[in-house]
Image: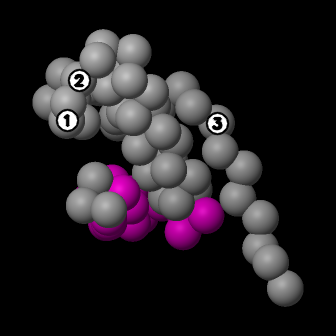
Amino acid sequence: GDLLTALFAAAVVEGQPMSYALARAVGAVVETVMAADAWGASELPVVAMGARIRQPSQSVRIERLV
């Protein structure tokens, strides 16, 4: 939750549209969790992910539910 909130807030502060900010934040969290699993880490490797968190390669589609 903290990582998602920080990444979302950072994107909003940068002036990114809300949908992009959310997609980028979720993609970065997904990538970080996948890296932790692949590395057998007991905690999220936030520092080790560095630039990968800033521009995640995981693509997330955001849809508005009505």
Res. 59 mark: 3
Residue placed under numbered mark 1 in the picture: 43
Which circle's residue, 2 or 3, is located before the other in the chain?
Answer: 2
Image coordinates for residue 9, horizontal then vertical, percent: 32, 66
Image coordinates for residue 3, horizontal then vertical, percent: 28, 53
Q: Which residue is found at the position 19% from the left and 35% from the top? A: 43
Q: Quadrant of residue 35?
A: top left
| Mark 3, other Cα within 10 Å: few <14 / some 14–19 / many ≥20 | few
Res. 41 mark: 2
CB atoms at circles 1 and 2 under 8 Å apart?
yes
Task: Say above or below: 23 vs 35.
Answer: below
Q: Which residue is found at the position 77% from the left and 64% from the top? A: 63
The rendered magenta stretch, by its main secondary structure, is classed as helix
Please, which residue is most extreme toward the left here?
Answer: 47
Which circle's residue, 1 or 3, is located before the other in the chain?
Answer: 1
Residue 55 seen in this snapshot = no
* Residue type at tag 1: Glu
For numbered disc 1, what is the local secondary structure? loop
3D distance between C-alphas at marks 1 and 2: 5 Å
Please, which residue is most extreme toward the top here?
Answer: 39
Disc number lying in front (2 or 3): 2
* Residue type at tag 3: Ser
| Mark 1, other Cα within 10 Å: few <14 / some 14–19 / many ≥20 | few
Please, which residue is most extreme toward the right here?
Answer: 66
For numbered disc 2, what is the local secondary structure? loop
Looking at the rendering, the stretch of residues picked out in magenta corresponds to 4-19
